[in-house]
Image: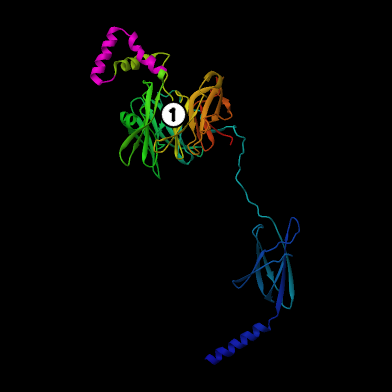
Amino acid sequence: MKILLFFLGMIWTGFALSQEAARVYVSCMNRESGDPVFRAKVTYTLNSISKTVETNKKGECSFDVLSGTEITVTVSHDYFAPQTRILKVKEGEPELNLEIFLERKVRELNTVNIKAPGVPDIIYESRTYSVADFELLPQGEVLLLLYPKTLKKGSELAVLSGGEIIKKFSLPEKPLELVHDFRKNPHVICETGVFGIHRSEQELGISRLDKTYYLKYVMPIVDTSYSSLYFSTFNPVYPAFDYQAYDRLDSAYSNILEIKDDLMMELYRSEYKWVDVRTKLWAREKELETGIDKEIWIGANYFTQSVYYKELYAPMFKKNDSIYIFDYYKDKLFTFNLSGEKVDSVGIYHHYEPKKTGWRRNLIQDNETGEIYAFCEKDGICSLRRVDLKTGELGDNIVFQHRYIDKIAVSGGMAYYIYRPYESAQKKFLYRAKLPL
């Protein structure tokens, strides 16, 4: 049996060798220019067996096949669209020439709208709802506070993603404003409660929080670091407060900086001299009851209602490994490290002459880059000016196209704001404009 198989193999081999071989010459050229295509891969397939050769600098290559067969030739290249040919090699034909003209690959790109810095886009518009407030969420989402006519009736929370509303929440009571805590989690402050928006990997939800707890233990926290919480003792009816740090490792408190308006404090306490005797007796009873000075009771209940009282504004920001506090009552920008130790201070004067400069007591931090901007508005013309944290000076005006804009926020070099044209029936829309570098 083995001898028979051997002789059959010799006969088949002799028959295969008796077939004549044909040479196939392939030439690849660029259809547009007519130039040869170098390193094009030419793959020829016969009976499911494939071999590949490459073209030379002249765009040529060759290979041998048995005459009387049919082969598939495929040409591919990184910059050209692939092409396939089926060749039938006739018996007795010694050679075959194949010319292939390749075309550049065509890639369809999505439409990209390029606008100059300052030219706004409409992020949200509606014929039914106006935007009362908003908060920027991670992953480019925006939380909107919407209302049809007034906030008292029919107000809703909506999550905007990719230009579409993906979730809505109804509010059982009148909302006042949207805020975010030190973890950047959004909350809506209502008349009697606080509602927080929480997100899991699969869904968005809303939950009610105790308002007293939120105002006392969550809202005072300004920012955090690896081991510390930074918070303030700010009270809107008292012209002084402290910035403090709480070290979570050793449970220790430390004072960072005291903010105090000396002139306002003098007027605040002197109000006690001008009230009637009955009011003074009431203040003394409160002092005995709580231990808080009687002059503070009079100032908080009477002087804060006058046109002379203004809440303190001295914001704190954390950027990288530094803490910056703008003390406008000492005309200083203080720099601290994360341990609360003072590093540097520079003079700041941009808060003087607000009618001339348009200063609005509104510093805004880009939640991605950490850059800080001052918001200005003069005669309706709104602008941002970047704060140089090394010198305390303001940069050039970045003027917005729209006038009298509402709340503004900055994220990733993009400014988001609410606007409705003056004396227009249009609802309040949310806009976005790119800031110049």
Magenta: main secondary structure equals helix
In the foreground, 321 or 31: 321
- To which quarter of the image does residue 228 belong? top left
Tell me if residue 149 comes above or below residue 73 in the rendering. Answer: above
The image shows residue 161 at horizontal and vertical percentages of 48, 39
Tell me if residue 87 comes above or below residue 216 in the rendering. Answer: below
The image shows residue 436 at horizontal and vertical percentages of 59, 35
Residue span colored magenta: 263-292
Can residue 22 be seen in this snapshot?
A: yes
In the image, is 407 to the left or to the right of 52?
left
Q: Residue at x 45, y 40 (%)?
A: 321
In the image, is 329 to the left or to the right of 24?
left
289 is within the stretch colored magenta: yes
Direction top: furthest residue:
276
Mark 1: few/some/many CA within 10 Å (<14, 14-19, 20+): some
Can residue 419 be seen in this snapshot?
A: no
The image shows residue 271 at horizontal and vertical percentages of 35, 12
Q: Quadrant of the C terminus?
A: top right
Q: Residue at x 35, y 30 (%)?
A: 194
Direction right: furthest residue:
34
In the foreground, 435 or 220: 220
The image shows residue 248 at horizontal and vertical percentages of 33, 40
The residue pinned by badge 1 equals: 315
Q: How is the image coloured?
A: rainbow
In the image, is 122 to the left or to the right of 234?
right
Tell me if residue 373 comes above or below residue 225 in the rendering. Answer: above
Tell me if residue 90 comes above or below residue 382 in the rendering. Answer: below
